[in-house]
Amino acid sequence: MSCVRENYCTECEWSVSSGDHPVPERTQLAIEHAVTTGHDIDCILDTEEPSTDAFAVDSAEQSVD
C-alpha cells in the first residue's frame, strides 16, 4: 500500500505533498507558510486502497430480529 501525506492550507490553495518533499522539508514549508500568512495548516493521508467505513461494516454484521 502506498501512502501520500499532504499538508495543506485551510484558507488558500497552498499545499505540499510527501510525494514531492521528505517529512522534515514538508514540515518546515508548512510552518513557514503558517508563520508568513497566519493561515492554519492541516494534513491528510491519501492511500491507494479505499478505506472502509467501520460503522457501515458493524451495522451490516448486526442482524435485526
Image: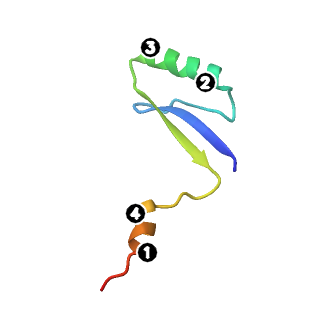
Of marks 3 and 2, the one in the foreground: 2
Residue holding disc 1: 61
What is the secondary structure assignment of the residue under circle 4? helix
Residue holding disc 4: 55
Q: Looking at this view, is 54 or 44 the one in front?
A: 54
Up the image or down, 1 lies above or below 8; here it is below
Residue holding disc 3: 35
Residue holding disc 2: 26
Marks 4/1: CA distance? 10 Å
Query: Which residue is rendered at x = 32% and y = 82% of the image?
Result: 64
Marks 3/4: CA distance? 38 Å
Q: Looking at this view, is 57 or 42 the one in front?
A: 57
In terms of sequence position, does the residue under pointer 3 or pointer 4 come before the other?
3
Q: Looking at this view, is 2 or 9 the one in front?
A: 2
Quarter the C terminus occupies: bottom left
Provide residue 18's location: percent of width, then percent of height.
Answer: 65, 33
